[in-house]
Image: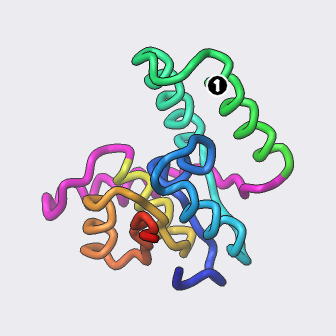
Amino acid sequence: MKNLDKPLFFDTSALLPYYRLEVLSFVVQTILTAARNDIFINDLTDVEIASAIARWRRMDEMSESDALAIQQKFTEHKILGYYTYQPILFDDFKQATDWLLQRKTALRTCDALHLAYTARLGAVLVTADKKLGQAAKEFGVDYQLLIPRTH
C-alpha cells in the first residue's frame, strides 16, 4: 500500500474484515500491521460497526456469541489505542454537503462525511467501496481501494 507514513482512515467496508473473516481480511490485517502513523476513527465508525453487527445477527449470518466477540474485540482495540479518535466536525458536514450538492459522484450521506473527515485530517482513505474510491479521486482525497489478494 502506498502512503503508509500518512495517517489512515478505514471506512467501515475496510475495517470490518479485520474483525470478521472475509475475502479482504488478510489484506486489511497486512495494512493495519504495517501502518506507521495514526489510524483514525470517529463516532460514525462506532455506529456503522454496530449497525453491521446488528444486521449480520438479524440476517442470521452469525451467532449472538460471535456478534458479542466482534463487538468486544473492537471495543478492546479502541481502549488499547489501536485507533486515534478524532470527532467529526461542523466543517466536515459542510464539506460533505458541498460535495453532495455538486452531484458529480454517487456519494451517500455517511460516505460523504467519511470522505470530508479524511480530507480534513490529511489522511488516506482506505476503502473496499469502489464508488467511494471514485468520489475520493474526483475530489482529490488520497485513497487506497482494497482488492482481494490472489494466490
Is 88 covered by the magenta stretch?
Answer: yes
In the image: residue 146, left or right of residue 97: right
Is 122 covered by the magenta stretch?
Answer: no
Q: Position of residue 84 (x, y in %)?
A: 72, 57
| Residue at 49 percent of width and 59 percent of height | 117
Q: Is residue 64 above or below residue 143?
A: above
Residue sitting nearer the eye, 110 or 90: 110
Which residues lie in the magenta part?
Answer: 81-110
| Residue at 32 percent of width and 44 percent of height | 109
The extreme right residue here reads 80
In the image: residue 119, left or right of residue 138: right
Give the residue at mark 1. Answer: 66
Look at label 1 and name its amino acid: Asp
Q: Position of residue 118 (x, y in %)?
A: 50, 65
Q: Position of residue 42 (x, y in %)?
A: 60, 48
| Residue at 66 percent of width and 33 percent of height | 70
The quarter of the picture where residue 58 lies is top left
Residue sitting nearer the eye, 44 or 148: 148
The way the protein has been coloured in the rendering is rainbow
